[in-house]
Image: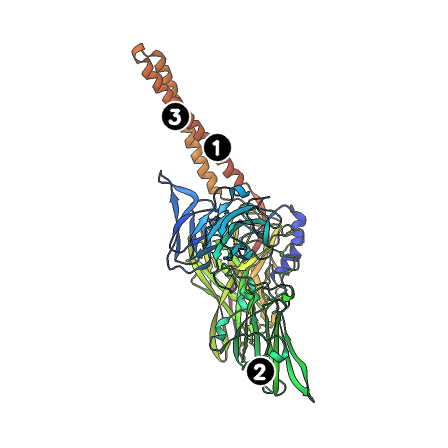
């Protein structure tokens, strides 16, 4: 169950804030976000140009990738200047094929990610429009075409095929972060539909005759534009097995799938026919079985013997492999009633519940917008009697579809207690109209602290406490974890940048540390993020996923609007039962709305501490801990204070200063050039006849130079206005987290 932590506190408190401020105010400070890339991938061993778009990525940027075998350099014009938002990407020949993450390192730090695919096939980027049979883009066998969906239209592609030739045509979209819901059609030479797919973007096609054929692609509701990109793969398939799929990103639910645990188990393959009880495939436990939910309504039956007192853990992975499946397991004991076989239900295993209740509305009103549960199965099988048992496995969605690609892994193992972790940035939770579900990269402003919710899926009965932490952080950044208590499902990770932290970046790691069988073990944590910054979840369904790595950055150009920290950076000590007063220092960098900022403790250790008010502009405050009333036992603790505030935020005011300087310079140059042109014009009027023509040509050149100067002046004025408008103060409500306070409670003196 979810604790009454930051989410509920802010939900209740913000009714007051929004009663006093405009409902149109923004939520969360601007963060850099990479929105689109074209093309969205490339062939290993090639170099090509990539253009990007994004939010809040102004200034000189770097394009970075989650794998070091993919690199990028800014494209340089003939004049030697970097072309804005255009890069030359190089993929090493030995770069791993699959989906990686691309990001922009900008003025505000590291951006949110965008999927970038590496293939082993020749790739092209569609250029000209192809919205008719006459303008169809030619597809070459065994290639990939990168394209953007044409709005309110159909994209056409053409290919030739011999009778009986088999092709696989796939439109990758959702699996590479696109908003496109693809409809894929193969048509004859007249454009008449032969085969269509409106669900998964894959067609397995065998040509009925020699001739020309067309592939038609459109969005389910005929939407299009830059965010509706896709990769169209066209493959010759000589075999008879399932058509291959392009790699895709991983869902948040997949973090709980830890296949390494089954590395030493005997490997088996599901063998048909095994649908009927009399056809049950005999297996010996433990085992690791590869199988398929195929054909439609497939039920795979396995038979094994077990002894009373045996305990096994049964796990199925299919939905967590990226498939639209819902595995269901039924275990029955086989008995005999005379000559008649009788089956007695022993156990059922269905969904893996989310460690904490996700938001009920798709954004962040009453819980996180991340659902860490899975449609896969994981459960304990306790054997009460010696005998023969049968396990039936089916896909609850498989009755009406026959998809050979719907595979699964069935693992039956002895208890191996362990855990898996996932983390995501906390969202605002406002009662009065907020519908934001934003991608929030770990792009820290100096003096800022970000809070991350960390959830655990406990495996095979593990119930211990988990310490949370991070490693490989950039200069000036630290992390503190509020542990996941024994038997609980959620903890908090705080990432802080010092007030004097320099501009920096690194690839960090999230980890959890616990005791398993008397040994200290460390497990990695996965980071989840929104695919798109959804500002109104009533209009667009949020779509989160796991990202490949954990990049952390500090902006060198902007500080946090406010920094709240203990007056001294030390471990604060007190004896059990005493009172501990901790002074706080407050650094204000922006104007704020309201009379004060209210802060409350985060986590279970100090939940009895009353909220404190920090008056606006106050240089400090204090928090008092009555350790007797709190009944705090001796030990090490971290106190984290949090709340929210509405800041008057100005976007990049330094850009206004630069634009003002450039405008003044352009105005002065225009004045000087105009004066020079006037002087030359006066001289031309007085020039003798033999020099008249030369003087007039000089005047023409000066007039042309004057026009260019006036154009530069007007351009500088536009840039000045744009920078000024962008830097106009706006109300932004955001989470405020104080730097963690380290506390050591020592035993009370014995009398």
- Kindly identify which residue carries mark 1: 717
Q: Earlier in the sequence, mark 1 or mark 3?
A: 3
From the viewer's side, name the closer residue of 386 and 77. Answer: 386
2 or 3: mark nearer the eye: 2
Q: Label 1: state its secondary structure.
A: helix
Q: CA distance from mark 2 to mark 3?
A: 90 Å
Q: Nearer the viewer, mark 2 or mark 1?
A: 2
Question: Residue at position x 51%, y 44% from top?
Answer: 136
Q: In this view, which residue lies farthest toward the bottom?
A: 338
Residue 119 in the image: x percent, y percent?
Answer: 44, 57
Real-space Cα distance between discs 1 and 3? Answer: 18 Å
Residue hosting label 3: 705
Mark positioned earlier in the residue sequence (2 or 3) = 2
Is 225 situated left or right of 691 in this image? right
Left or right of 723 on screen, residue 326 = right
User: Which mark is drawn over residue 435?
Assistant: none
Marker disc for residue 304: 2
Query: In this orientation, which residue lies closer to the viewer: 190 or 524?
Result: 190
Where does the image place residue 87, in percent across and percent down from the top left? 41, 47
């Amino acid at each position: 169950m979810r604790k009454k932590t930051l989410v509920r506190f802010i939900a209740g408190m913000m009714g007051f804030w929004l009663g006093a401020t405009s409902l149109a105010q923004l939520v969360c400070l601007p963060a850099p976000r990479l929105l689109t890339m074209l093309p969205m991938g490339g062939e290993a061993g090639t170099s090509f140009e990539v253009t990007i778009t994004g939010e809040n990525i102004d200034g000189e940027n770097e394009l970075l990738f989650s794998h070091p075998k993919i690199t990028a350099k800014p494209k340089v014009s003939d004049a030697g200047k970097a072309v804005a938002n255009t890069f030359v990407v190089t993929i090493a020949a030995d770069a791993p094929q699959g989906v990686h993450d691309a990001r922009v390192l900008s003025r505000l730090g590291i951006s949110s990610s965008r999927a970038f695919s590496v293939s082993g096939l020749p790739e092209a980027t569609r250029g000209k429009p192809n919205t008719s049979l006459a303008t169809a883009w030619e597809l070459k066998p065994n290639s990939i075409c990168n394209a953007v969906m044409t709005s309110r239209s159909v994209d056409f592609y053409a290919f030739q095929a011999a009778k009986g030739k088999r092709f696989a045509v796939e439109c990758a979209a959702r699996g590479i972060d696109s908003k496109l819901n693809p409809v894929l059609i193969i048509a004859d030479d007249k454009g008449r539909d032969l085969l269509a797919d409106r669900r998964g973007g894959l067609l397995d096609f065998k040509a009925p005759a020699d001739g020309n054929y067309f592939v038609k692609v459109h969005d389910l509701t005929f939407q299009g534009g830059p965010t509706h990109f896709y990769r169209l793969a066209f493959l010759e398939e000589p075999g008879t097995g399932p058509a291959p799929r392009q790699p895709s990103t991983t869902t948040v639910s997949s973090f709980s799938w830890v296949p390494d645990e089954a590395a030493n188990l005997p490997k088996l393959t599901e063998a048909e026919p095994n649908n009927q009880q009399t056809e049950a495939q005999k297996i010996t436990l433990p085992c690791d079985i590869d199988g398929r939910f195929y054909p439609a309504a497939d039920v795979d039956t396995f038979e094994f013997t077990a002894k009373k007192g045996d305990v096994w853990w049964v796990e199925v992975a299919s939905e967590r492999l990226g498939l639209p499946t819902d595995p269901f397991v039924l275990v029955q004991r086989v008995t005999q009633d005379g000559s008649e076989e009788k089956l007695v239900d022993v156990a059922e295993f269905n969904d893996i519940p989310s460690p904490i209740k996700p938001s009920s509305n798709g954004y962040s009103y009453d819980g996180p917008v991340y659902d860490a549960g899975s449609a896969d199965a994981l459960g304990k099988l306790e054997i009460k009697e010696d005998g023969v048992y049968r396990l039936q496995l089916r896909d609850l969605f498989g009755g009406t579809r026959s998809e050979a690609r719907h595979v699964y892994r069935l693992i039956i193992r002895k208890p191996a207690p362990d855990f898996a972790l996932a983390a995501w940035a906390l969202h605002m939770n406002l009662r009065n109209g907020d519908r934001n579900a934003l991608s929030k990269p770990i792009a820290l402003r100096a003096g800022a602290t970000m809070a991350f919710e960390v959830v655990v899926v406990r495996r095979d009965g593990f119930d211990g406490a988990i310490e949370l932490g991070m490693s490989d952080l950039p200069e000036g950044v630290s992390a503190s974890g509020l542990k996941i208590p024994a038997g609980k499902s959620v903890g908090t990770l705080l990432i802080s940048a010092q007030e004097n932290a320099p501009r920096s970046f690194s690839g960090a790691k999230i980890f959890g540390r616990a005791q398993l069988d008397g040994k200290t073990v460390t497990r990695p944590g996965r980071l989840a993020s929104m695919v798109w910054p959804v500002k109104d979840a009533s209009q667009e369904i949020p779509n989160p996923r796991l990202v490949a790595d954990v990049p952390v950055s500090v902006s060198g150009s902007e500080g946090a609007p406010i920094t709240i920290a203990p007056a001294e950076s030390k471990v604060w000590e007190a004896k059990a039962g005493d009172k501990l007063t901790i002074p706080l220092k407050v650094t204000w960098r922006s104007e704020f709305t309201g009379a004060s900022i209210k802060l409350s403790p985060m986590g279970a250790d100090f939940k009895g501490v009353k909220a404190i008010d920090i008056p606006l502009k106050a240089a400090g405050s204090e928090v008092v801990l009555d350790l007797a009333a709190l009944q705090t036992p001796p030990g090490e603790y971290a106190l984290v204070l949090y709340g929210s505030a509405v800041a008057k935020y100005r976007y990049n005011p330094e850009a206004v200063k630069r634009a003002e300087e450039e405008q003044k310079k352009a105005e002065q140059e225009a004045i000087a050039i105009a004066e020079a042109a006037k002087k030359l014009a006066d001289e031309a009027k007085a020039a003798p006849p033999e020099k008249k023509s030369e003087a007039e040509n000089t005047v023409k050149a000066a007039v042309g130079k004057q026009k260019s100067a006036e154009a530069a002046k007007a351009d500088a004025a536009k840039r000045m206005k744009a920078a000024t408008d962008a830097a106009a103060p706006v109300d932004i409500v955001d989470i405020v987290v104080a730097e963690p306070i380290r506390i050591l409670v020592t035993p009370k003196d014995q009398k």
